[in-house]
Image: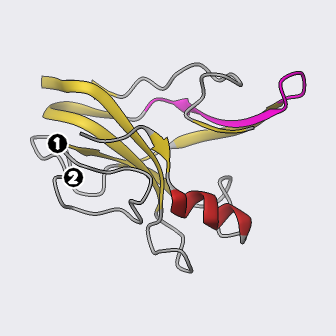
Amino acid sequence: MATTCLTNNFRQGLLVGNYDMDSDVIKMALYNGSTHGFNTGAYTTTNEASGTGYSAGGVTMSGVAQSTDTTNNVSYLDWSTDPSWATSTITATDCMIYDDTTVTNPATDASCYIGDFGGSKSSSAGTFTVVLPAAAYNTAVIRLA
C-alpha cells in the first residue's frame, strides 16, 4: 500500500532549487500495489500499471498554476487538466507525480508526490482519469505551509 505524501526527495530538491514546476516536464505514472512513500526517490517501472492505452512513464501533466492563500499561509500547485488515458483498459491502486526533467541531486526523474487511491480503480475500453482535488490551500495535492 502506498503512502499519500510529498516525497522527501521533492522536499530536499525544493530547498536546493532543483524544480521549476512552470517549465519542467511533470508526469504522472500509475501503479498497482506499490509500497511507495516518503522515501521513494524517483520514477520506477517496478509495479507500474500496464494495459491497453497505458505507456510506461505515464502522461505529461499540463496547465500548472501556483497560488498562495495569504490568510492560511499556504502555497499550492494545481493543474488545469486532470491526467487521463483515453480508450484504455487499466487497473491502478496509486500514482506518482514526478519531474521528468530533473537531472541533478536528488535524482533523475525525481518523485514529487505519491497518491494512494484507497483501492483498485479501473477503466475498461474507456478513459481512466485521475481527478485532482480542488485547487485550494487545504486540498491541492502539492501544498506547502
- Examine the image and state in which quarter residue 10 appears: bottom right
| Residue drawn at x 42%, y 37% as measured from the top left | 4
Q: Is residue 1 left or right of residue 28?
A: left
Give the residue number, with chain letter if any, for mark 2.
Answer: 55
Furthest-bottom residue in view?
104
Which circle, 2 or 1, is nearer the viewer?
A: 1
Q: Is residue 125 visible?
A: no
Q: Is residue 67 above or below residue 136?
A: below
Q: Amino acid at mark 2?
A: Ser
Q: Quadrant of the C terminus?
A: top right
Above or below, 65 against 22 in this view is: above
The Cα–Cα distance between marks 2 and 1, rounded to whole angstroms, is 18 Å
Residue 2 position within the rendered picture, expressed as x and y whole percent measured from the top left = 30, 42
Looking at the rendering, the stretch of residues picked out in magenta corresponds to: 69-82
Q: Secondary structure at mark 2?
A: loop
* Helix, strand or loop status at disc 1: loop
Q: Residues within 10 Å of mark 2 (few under 14, many from 20)?
A: some
Q: Is residue 103 magenta?
A: no
